[in-house]
Amino acid sequence: MSYIKIARFDHWIKQLFILPGSMVAMLLLKEKYSIVAMSNVLLSLLATSFIASANYVINEWLDAEFDKFHPVKSKRPLVNNSFKKEFIFLEYFIFIALGVVISLLVSKYVLITELVLLLMGILYNVKPFRMKEIPYVDVLIESINNALRFLIGWFAITSMYYPPVSIVFGYWMSGGYLMSVKRFAEYRMIDDKETASLYRKSFRYYNDNNLMIYSIFLALMAVFFLGIFLIKYKIELLLFMPFMIGLFCFYFAISFKDDSAVQRPEKLYKERNLIFYIIILIIVFVVLMYIRIPFLDAFTTIDLVPIAGI
């Protein structure tokens, strides 16, 4: 049973971050919904879930000696039980095999992106790389997985075009923002510099202030890149930005709660107000994709308009 727990099947909900990639691809390419497209999306969700579980297995195994210093993660199976290394590796490679085989059923681009996702798990967790211990870099490396999920969703729909670079970077920076806020909430919960440093070496260099500033920086970078995409591809989506900024503020406010859900994103579904806001956000995005607001064209021109009477 413990070997099943370390695969973190309850974290599979995170793969829903694939869906915006598919949705944007269908909207931009004006693809019609079809059984083939939906099947590819579902297969991509499943393949990514298995690859993610492979990364979770190696993460739990290599982090066991550090997780004992975390008030919640100290209850993880590998911290409190002995496991056979052979079974850990067997489980790891079984998940990889399942992810690879299912990816092949979709497209070679989905497969390549899944393999990059697997590589990021190695760079993040395994020595001599173990980039999770490098301050600031740890957030950027782990949040690349967010951009990779977007790409998987996109390539599940099309193998003919690459997605716009601006939205991929915006998605990456958005993931970085979520991760930095998670670090902020974790640091506040542990509330002891020495213990926090034993749990995660990067916490030797972090504190409330620089984590908050880093979160704001990444949020602004996300808004910058997403703004480029929205203005370039459909000016009406400019009206979407205040809602997106509101989401960033909403999420940051949650991080101040005791034992905040932002530390465990798989539990965010319990934040009902947040889920309701995200549903509104999706509706606004879809509506703006299909309507035309001519006066917003003024934001795309640099022509100087003379003042009347001069």
Image: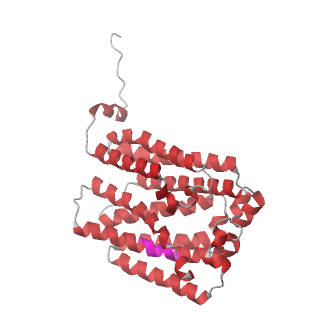
Q: Residue furthest right?
A: 194
Asked whether, in this view, residue 148 is left or right of residue 157, the answer is right
Query: Measured along the vertical axis of the image, is residue 301 above or below residue 149?
Result: above
Query: Measured along the vertical axis of the image, is residue 236 above or below residue 22?
Result: above
Q: Main secondary structure of the magenta part?
A: helix
Viewer-proximal residue, 129 or 249? 249
- Rendered location of residue 47, percent (x, y): 40, 74
For residue 301, what is the image quadrant?
A: top left
Viewer-proximal residue, 8 or 101? 8
Quadrant the C terminus occupies:
top left
The residue lying at 29 percent from left, 45 percent from top is 287
Viewer-proximal residue, 262 or 26? 262
Total marks in image = 0
Q: Residue furthest top?
A: 309
Kindly tell me whether residue 128 is visible in this rendering.
no
Which region is colored magenta? 48-54
Asked whether, in this view, residue 234 is left or right of residue 202, the answer is left
For residue 141, what is the image quadrant?
A: bottom right
The residue lying at 62 percent from left, 88 percent from top is 84
- Rendered location of residue 294, percent (x, y): 27, 33
The magenta stretch spans residue 217: no
The residue lying at 28 percent from left, 70 percent from top is 39
Viewer-proximal residue, 270 or 33? 270
For residue 140, what is the image quadrant?
A: bottom right
Kindly tell me whether residue 216 is visible in this rendering.
yes
- Rendered location of residue 204, percent (x, y): 74, 59
